[in-house]
Image: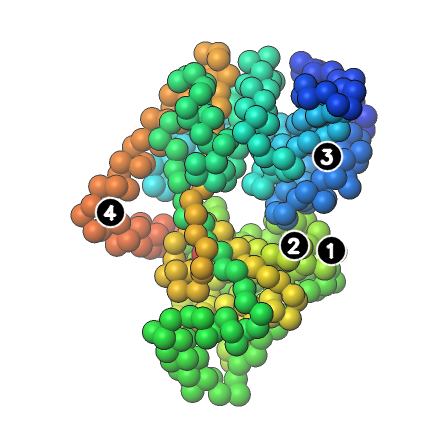
Amino acid sequence: MRAYIENHPAEAPSAPRISTPPETPVGTTKPKVRVLRTISELEEFRELWTAWCEDPTSDIDSYLVAARLNSSVVRPHIMVLYRGGRPDCLLVGRLEHCRLPLKVGYTTLFNPPVRRLFFLQGGFLGNQSGENCKILIEEVLHCLNAGEADTADLARIQEKSDLQNICREELPLLSHGHFLPLHQHRAVKLPESYEAFFRGLSRKNRHELRRHEKILNNAFAGKQHIQCFRGEDELEEMAKEVDKISEKTYQRAIGAGFKPDDETLGFLRTAAHRGGLRGCVLYLEEQPCAFFIGNQYKNTFHANYMGFDPKFGKYSPGLSLLMHSIEDSFEASATRIDFGWGDRQYKRAICNEVWQDGPIYLYAFSLRGLTLNLLRSGTSFLDLSARKLLVKFSIFQRTKKSWQSWLQRSRDHNETPKPEPSTEELN
């Protein structure tokens, strides 16, 4: 997309267009949808976009960074719904040309090239009424059937929301995906102080936290310190130190976790420029052994990357750094911490909010769209069935850890041998 922005600052590509509607006179209720397809059009909505946005992933500056640095992005695809001549809501997305890995567990069965409309996590802004949801879904399907893309992904939509209900109950069977995964999403609403937060934990969890803290302090008295990173000028050093830990993880082996690539660093640089970067590295005997990186956006701290070196695993360094980061959130006037997907034990111990969310997949009514739906839904069915079977026989976690260890060993076998062949990140 970088070349497109530089060479076509005010032009849309030659995809089918939906013209900008004339403003509806104030007092009427007939909605109109406008689709923004160029970078220059986005600035018109900066103030409104920023006021409505609650997730740094869909922040306008983060959006522009990803558009510039992500090679799969072709152009914007922002849907603006007007009522009474005024914007009532936005759906933030982009057109991508990419590969779509379809997996069962960690095994990729299919990896077809696709043209995809991708709507970002937290990118539904403004009035999220049921009527607005229905209009936007219809407009997405219209764009797909007009040939703009093969499929559309709406990321992390909350279970039983209007968007999910409309797609599952009102759309034709072949136009949406089936057997979609749902994930636990946890957060903690913070009280007035760290002391009040700690008192609010169960007695058992308070005891465990103190016990782990004592073990760490006894083993490394005077040999531990935490370095915090906040500014843009500190980002390069932070990425270098964090990568020393992250490169050992199984997440890296499967292409996930923290990677100091251009897009990740661009996202964190945007956070630092806004004053929201919260990065911490714990050192034991001058060795980086755990990291916690997050992004405070408005009053919510969003945990992005966490991990630890397994060499120090028995001292629970990640847990110690987690509690430090929570305490630091109070100093930054955060009122909430969003830990994202995952149902790890540490999240269950400290979080007081939980819900489920997952993707929505829509498809063009075309041979390619229907084929993609069949492949993706079939793969999702196999994956969900395998997980349920493993859970039923109480071997899911053991199988998952064994597979992760195998991936780690396989990766290390093909690289320079390292003294510590495996790890497990907090998230």
Residue wearing tag 4: 391
CB atoms of marks 1 and 4 within 8 Å: no
Numbered label tally: 4
State the residue at coordinates (68%, 21%): 29
- Residue type for callout 2: Tyr
- Residue 188 placement (x, y as % from top left): 50, 60
Label 1: which secondary element: helix
Residue toward you, 206 or 253: 206
Residue toward you, 133 or 323: 133
Residue 282 lies, with reference to residue 76, above or below; the image says below
Would residue 397 be found to the left or right of residue 335 on screen? left
Disc 3 or 4, which lies upstream in sequence?
Answer: 3
Q: Residues within 10 Å of mark 1 (few under 14, many from 20)?
A: some
- Residue 159 placement (x, y as % from top left): 43, 39
Q: CA distance from mark 2 to mark 1?
A: 9 Å
State the residue at coordinates (66%, 44%): 53
Question: Residue 297 bears which disc, if any?
Answer: 2
Q: Nearer the viewer, mark 3 or mark 2?
A: 2
Question: Residue 274 bears which disc, if any?
Answer: 1
Q: Residues within 10 Å of mark 3 (few under 14, many from 20)?
A: some
Disc 2 or 1, which lies upstream in sequence?
Answer: 1
Q: Point out the residue furthest to the left here.
A: 393
State the residue at coordinates (68%, 31%): 88
Q: CA distance from mark 3 to mark 2?
A: 26 Å
Quarter holding the C terminus is: bottom left
Residue wearing tag 3: 2
Q: CA distance from mark 2 to mark 4?
A: 36 Å
Disc 3 or 1, which lies upstream in sequence?
Answer: 3
